[in-house]
Amino acid sequence: MRTRQLVIVASACFLLSTTWAQTGAKPAAGQSLSVAASSASADSLLNGGLAAWSQIAVKHVALNRTPPLYDTDEPATLEISIIDVRLARVRKSLLVQLSWRDPTHDATILAEVPNTPPETRFRKVQTEADDRFFDAAAVMFPAKIGSGAIAPSLQMGDAEHPVEIYYWNATRGSMVMQAQGRGTTRRTGQNFPANSTYQNGQWNVIFELPDLPAGTTVAFAVWNGSQKDRDGRKYFSVWQVLE
């Protein structure tokens, strides 16, 4: 009975958070992100530290907590409720800075895995590595970009509306992923420029994305290693629209 109740609650939460996305409705007021046109180089924003972003406006984006996905999941409190987002357009790139408070620095050094091939599984299962949990973050946006495009489901898109996921992990680095529905996330074998610092209980991570045009929807996610976050257990935002 308890398992059935958890499934019902989880389904209801996801339906509430994705209804507008599935129907193609426009985001509510306040869910837009301004993008600064910067004369700086992508490298200076990527590696210039906090000072390089000091003149770019910040947007405080609320984060939600996913409900329990497995019976073995421990209850998790909302420790990270806000993520600060700054965006700058530089020639053919969109630079995204994500900052959030996290009292624990969950990272380690792992042996490098050379020539990791793209995943070919159709559906992903829960990770078996449940004894190591690392801080991570991601930016998700539609794989199909164009005027009038419907925002995909927040549950990693669907077959007709796939998504691209630029994922950064404090231990494993950056990687580009694709998905077309919950449980279908796969690695592409590609990575992207990223830089990260952890200081005084705060993460600052910079992503270099393709030059996404105005009107593109983007969403953010954060994994908190100290809360045993992994896979679908995470913090997430609703869709935001680039101005």
Image (cartoon, grey):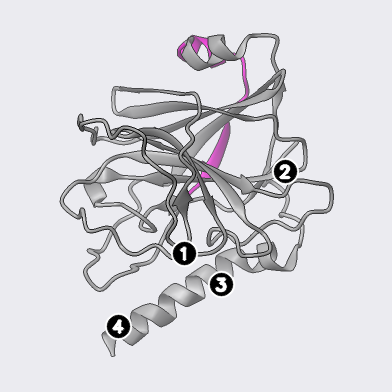
Circle nearer the N terminus (2, 1) = 1
- The three-letter amino acid code for the residue at tag 4 is Thr
Residue topped by disc 2: 216
**Of the residues shown, which amino acid type is indicated by label 2?**
Thr
How many neighbours does mark 2 have within 10 angstroms: few (below 14), some (14-19), or many (20 or more)? Answer: many
Where is mark 1, residue-wise? Answer: 122
> Residue 232: percent from the left, percent from the top?
39, 58
Is 19 above or below relative to 218? below
Q: How many marks?
A: 4
Q: Earlier in the sequence, mark 2 or mark 4?
A: 4
Indicate which label's residue lies in the foreground, 2 or 1.
1
The residue shown at (44%, 64%) is 183
Are the residues tagged 2 and 4 within 8 Å (C-beta)? no
Amino acid type indicated by mark 1: Phe
Q: Which residues are magenta?
A: 49-63
Q: CA distance from mark 4 to mark 1?
A: 26 Å
Q: Mark 3 belongs to which amino acid?
A: Leu
Q: Which residue is mark 3?
A: 15
